[in-house]
Structures are given as structure tokens and as C-alpha cells.
């Protein structure tokens, strides 16, 4: 069953590719996961200060663990946080919707490899060119610093949005 | 390929069921689609007036058409709008996240069956009991009335959130 699921996820990812051209790579070696928009929803979020509206998605490993309430998340878990400019709906201005794509950020769990940053590898790809963020691998200190207040939640701000 | 994709979607849906108990049915006969949280992301949205944060997902037919820019959406397209109470993140109050589940709404395309409401069947399931909205089938007039200003966009407020 597990094999079948992974095979299916691969097939579905192939069916609707989201990236053309070479895959961008962050300065710490993490390459963009091109199928992040094919992953399951973890939660929406809205950043008032930045004017961003976002969706967090997760790969099969991450979503299965989050649904089961497993913390810390197991190795192989990957979460994507996709941000768009928050814009007022032209026909219905009390609704805020996704405008221009801003960036996608990834958190990749490998307890051994990323031991010094809570078991998480971080990466951010910015703008329509998906430009890797950071001049060198030290950019992760910025990411990790921001996530430190949520160390007690496996360094995750995001929780699984619940449904009945 | 198409068959394989549908088989995969069914398998993935089975893998992580989101509903326990009998499937609720709206007064117009539309039953809740239990795998709506396994569908792909169409877009996030935020309703300032209601204090709701939302994710719109779509089944394979709907997402393929939206990505390809096909309008009106073909028969068999189903969109789900999932709403949660918008709450401030306890550790990071400039971020608004999903609190308690509010409701899930569906739009189901069948140009012939739902000819009188723009080719769309509507349904809403409210609260943790997923209680079908509406006393009788006339509840759709309320839904359709609200969607009339976006008749030129196949009665859809939501657009596909773009990624590079």
C-alpha cells in the first residue's frame, strides 16, 4: 500500500509539473521540490505585517505524521510554505486573495544532517525566477533564529488545520 | 494515463480518510466529498468581515482546467472551499492561522443538471457535525445570488493561485 501510494504521488507529480527549466538550489544544497503544489494542504495563513497570504503543504511523510499527531516529525518530512501578495478581491473587497507569487520556503527533516538547526534544513526560493535566498549556507541562522520560539513544537509555527 | 491518475486519486483518498460516520447530504442531494482535503490547492483566501481563513481545493478535473485556463470549467469539476476561524498565532501574533473548523462548501459542475444556477450545484456543510446547510433545495438561490457578480468568471470568485 505504501509503495503504491508513493508510486501514485510520483505519477500525479509528473502529470502536472509546476516548474520549467533547471531546478534552483539553495546555498546549503537543498534543491527546490518541484511538486510542492501537488502536496496535501497543511494549513492556510496570513501575514498582516508583510501583506502575504499563504498555504502550507506537506509531503506524504509530513502530512501522515501531522495527522497522527507525531512530534517531532520523522526524517523525510518536507513542508512547503507558499506565499502570495495578499490582494483585495476586485469584485468582493472584504475577501483577500492570492495575487502575485512571492516565494516558497521549505523545511526538510533530517535529524542527523541538520542536527544544529533542530533537525531541519531550510530553503527559500524568491520571486518568479525562484532565486535561492542567501549568499552562503549561513542564511539558515536567520531561519532557525526565527523558528526558535517554537522549539517546543518541533520548530514549527504551523499546525495541521483540523477538519471533522 | 488518465485512468491511472483517477485510480491513484481513489487510492490516495482511501489512504487518509477524513470522515467518520455516514456521509452528510445537502437538501439538493449533493453529498459531502470526503476527500476534499486530499485534493490539490487552488488558492488561499481570507474573509476580513467574517474572520475566516480559507483554502480552496479542487478535484483533478477542476485543477487541470484551471491550470490550463479553461473556462467554463468542464462537467465533473468540483471545488471545495474550507473555512476555519482566523486566529492570531499564540507565539507570533502578526500571523493569522486556522483555528476551529467552520464549514466546507462545494461547487459541482454539471452544465445540464444545474442549468438554472450557472451549471453549478452548491452545497455547504457546517461545523464539527458537518450539518447540511438549508431547509430545502431553495437554499441554492442564496449561493447563486452571491456568485452572480462573477458570472463572467464562470461564477467563480476564486482564481488559481499562480506559481512559477
Image: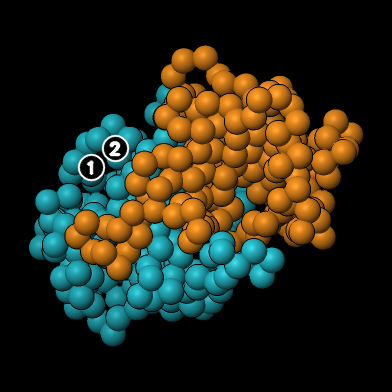
Chain colours: A orange, B cyan
Q: Name the chain under label 1.
A: B
Residue at 83% in and 35% down: A114
Residue at 60% in and 30% down: A133
Residue at 30% in and 40% down: B66
Q: Which mark is residue B65?
A: 2
Pointer 1: what residue? B74
Specify the quadrant that holds the N terminus of chain A.
top right
> How far apart, in angstroms, are the residues tagged by discs 2 and 1?
7 Å
Residue B149 place in picture, x, y as percent: 14, 62
Left/right placement of residue A15 relative to residue B158 reads right
Specify the quadrant that holds the C terminus of chain A.
bottom right
Q: Does dot 1 land on a helix, a strand or a loop?
A: loop
Residue A76 place in picture, x, y as percent: 75, 36
Q: Nearer the viewer, mark 2 or mark 1?
A: 2
Disc 2, disc 1: CB below 8 Å? Answer: yes
Left/right placement of residue B97 relative to residue B50 reads right
Residue B1 place in picture, x, y as percent: 43, 24
A130 up-or-down from B39: above or below? above
Work out whether residue B149 or residue B49 is closer to the camera in this orientation and state it: B49
Amino acid at each position: 500500500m505504501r509503495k503504491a501510494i508513493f508510486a501514485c504521488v510520483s505519477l500525479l507529480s509528473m502529470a502536472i509539473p509546476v516548474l520549467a527549466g533547471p531546478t534552483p538550489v539553495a546555498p546549503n544544497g537543498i534543491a527546490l521540490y518541484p511538486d510542492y503544489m501537488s502536496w496535501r494542504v497543511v494549513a492556510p495563513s496570513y501575514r498582516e505585517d508583510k501583506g502575504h497570504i499563504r498555504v502550507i503543504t506537506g509531503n506524504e511523510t509530513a502530512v501522515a505524521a501531522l495527522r497522527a499527531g507525531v512530534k517531532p516529525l520523522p526524517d523525510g518530512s518536507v513542508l512547503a510554505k507558499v506565499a502570495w501578495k495578499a490582494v483585495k478581491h476586485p469584485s468582493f473587497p472584504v475577501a483577500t486573495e492570492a495575487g502575485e507569487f512571492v516565494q516558497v520556503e521549505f523545511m526538510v527533516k533530517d535529524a542527523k544532517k541538520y542536527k544544529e538547526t533542530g533537525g531541519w534544513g531550510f530553503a527559500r526560493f524568491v520571486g518568479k525566477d525562484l532565486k535561492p535566498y542567501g549568499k552562503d549556507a549561513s542564511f539558515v541562522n536567520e531561519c532557525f533564529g526565527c523558528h526558535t520560539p517554537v522549539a517546543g513544537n518541533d520548530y514549527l509555527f504551523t499546525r495541521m488545520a483540523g477538519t471533522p
